[in-house]
Image: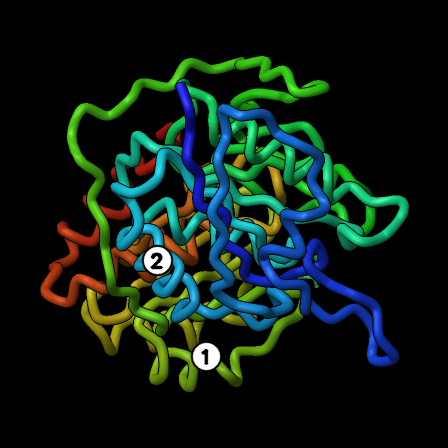
Amino acid sequence: MKKHLLVITTGGTIASVKDEAGLVPSLTSEELISYLPELGEDIMLTTKALYSLDSTDITPDHWLGLAKTIKDNYYKYDGFVVCHGTDTMAYTAAALSYLIQGSSKPIVFTGAQKPIGFEITDAKANLRDSILYAADDESMGVQIVFDGEVITGTRAKKTKSLSYAAFSSINYPLLASIHEGRIIRYMKQKKPETAPVFYDKLNKKVFLLKLTPGITPVLLPEIFKNYDAIIIESFGVGGIPESLEEVLFVELKKYRPEEKVLVMTTQVTYEGSHMETYEVGKTLSDNFSILEARDMTLEAVVTKLMWVLADEGLDWAGICGKFYRPVAADTLY
Ligand code: ASP
């Protein structure tokens, strides 16, 4: 059956050209597509240039704009391919997994480590694979297609800054791989029977505090004052160092748990947080109402919190229920 896809461009290396200032994302969406060889009569492409940005400059407002573009075009196309810079692609893919839930149509993110106009580039293969994947009947939901791998949108992380194999799937298997135009599926996904649910709000007041050995608590009161959620990226399975404990506990006691949501996660890429293991983590979780990221990626935790806390009327039980409920395979707990 003929498939009609919308290719949305947002910038990134894939659409960049080199000038004196360095790589600048300036190719139009038609120019980008013109680099692809014939795809066959079964695939029809329409392009939409949404942004022309290095993904370093993509913000939550751009995620909302992208979600709205897909919502506005959802019933006109069979699937969507989003060309995006690799640096923050995992955040955007996770954000879109929360903003568009239960999509029976594929929303495929891709990009490249080298611009599409370079003689040696991964861009053409990534774009062609993404289009083939988005045109396949069995594809659905949000994912990243990169270097021949298909990664669930909530599970992707950029783990290499230069290599073509830039992304890894964290704490979750690959959905599929693509070799010379052939899709090899490793996991069966079930098509949702109901229409997708679109969301149009995010709470941007989410702060990430990465711990370093010997960290001092000087900024903690300011962080608590200015943000609605604080994610502490701790060491190993998770704990709070003595140097932070006193000030952190004083701050936590000033607010109700739903007013300042504290989430513990880990700097370790694989296998997640397990706060109950050591005294340094247990003291916090025994004495305060906090959330734990468990097996979720940092990108998923940041964007899920923005989605959860966009709903302003939630009490603590409501926040816990929404945060821990798996969305788009973001957690297996
Ligand atoms: N700085 C670029 C970006 O994220 C890197 C890339 O696309 O690979 O937009």
Question: What amino acid is labelled 1 in the image?
Answer: Leu
Calculate the distance from the C-alpha at mark 2 to the C-alpha at mark 1: 38 Å
Question: What amino acid is labelled 2 in the image?
Answer: Thr
How many discs appear? 2
Kindly identify which numbered label has been placed on residue 220.
1
Residue at 29%, 21% in the rendered image:
191
Percent x, y of residue 66: 40, 59
Q: Earlier in the sequence, mark 2 or mark 1?
A: 2
Residue neighbourhood size for the residue with mark 2, other residues' Cα within 10 Å, grouped as few (<14), some (14–19), many (≥20):
some
What residue would you read off at disc 2?
Answer: 69
Q: Is residue 2 left or right of residue 18?
A: left
Residue neighbourhood size for the residue with mark 1, other residues' Cα within 10 Å, grouped as few (<14), some (14–19), many (≥20):
some
Percent x, y of residue 1: 40, 18
Q: Is residue 197 left or right of residue 182?
A: left
Percent x, y of residue 52: 58, 69
Q: Secondary structure at mark 2?
A: helix
- Looking at the rendering, in which quadrant would you find the C terminus? top left
Check mark 2 vs ligand 1: CB closer than 8 Å? yes or no. Answer: no
Residue at 12%, 60% in the rendered image:
314
Residue at 49%, 24% in the rendered image:
42
Ligand 1: which quarter? bottom right
> Would residue 188 be visible to someone looking at this image?
yes
Q: Nearer the viewer, mark 2 or mark 1?
A: 2
Q: Secondary structure at mark 1?
A: helix
- Viewer-nearest residue: 257 or 229: 229
